Image (cartoon, grey):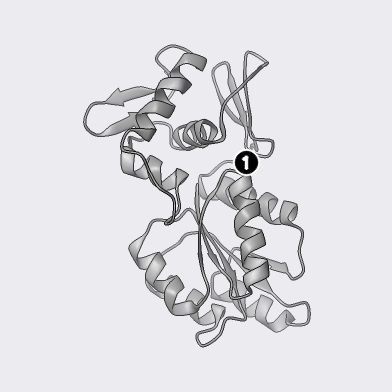
Amino acid sequence: MRVLLVEDDPLLGSGVQTGLRQNGYAVDWVKDGMAALSALDAESYDLAVLDVGLPGMSGLEVLTKLRESGQDIPVIILTARDTIDDRIKGLDLGADDYLVKPFDLDELTARIRALLRRSYGRSNPMLCYGPLELDPSSMTVRRDGDLVKVSRKEFTILHTLLENQGKLMSRQKLEESLYSWKDDVDSNTIEVHIHHLRKKMPDGLIRTVRGIGYIIDNPQ
């Protein structure tokens, strides 16, 4: 899953970026509103974390332009403790949730998971498929109740494919879920992770569509 973080405070931004990456998200971090709009126009994100108090163009202006352009990605706004009017206005302008600074990283990641579930039309926090059970909160995978050891990137690929079951996911889309702008990507990295995943998953779970990408078919 790929997240855009818009935060001008270097200490907070660095901490949130590091924490989200440790929780399996690919995070692009920008520090002002114009850069945020450019990123949102150029890249595909699953969610944005947007500070209201940005220099120059405020977070609320960014949110307004984002919704006016027709983009409907989930947005969490970050506000100062004493700006209740900004929280109300942000929600009215199309934000999906808010957090008041200072906040706990665990709460932010829980809210991100909840919004992503909602965006995919799920209420169950677990992703289940036959004998498989994937828990986004603990980043664990079980098969017939037994824990399956997967790497962080293998988990992210499996999560993305299960969340989009029945949809063909291109190699580029899977790379976007794994890597942010500054990461180096090997040419065969997706194929390698898929190869390792297949050894741990039920036969035939991940289907290759040659030259296009990968898919987990809807259950029969």
Query: Which residue is disc 1 drawn over?
Result: 123
Q: What element carries label 1?
A: loop
Query: Crowding at label 1, few (<14), some or many (≥20) Cα neighbours within 10 Å?
Result: few
Left-right relation of 81 to 215: right
Which residue sits furthest left? Answer: 211
> In x, y percent, where is residue 147?
66, 19
Q: What residue type is labelled 1?
A: Ser
Could you say where residue 80 lies in the image, as x and y percent from the top left? 73, 78
For the C terminus, which image quadrant? top left
Q: Which of 181 and 98 is in front in this view?
A: 181
Q: Which of 21 and 216 is in front in this view?
A: 21
Of the pair 52 and 93, the residue shown nearer to us: 52
At a point 48% along the width and 78% down the height, the residue shown is 33
Establish if 94 lies above or below 123: below
Q: Can residue 70 be seen in this view?
A: no
Going by the image, does 139 lie left or right of 44?
right
Q: In which quarter of the image is residue 51?
A: bottom right
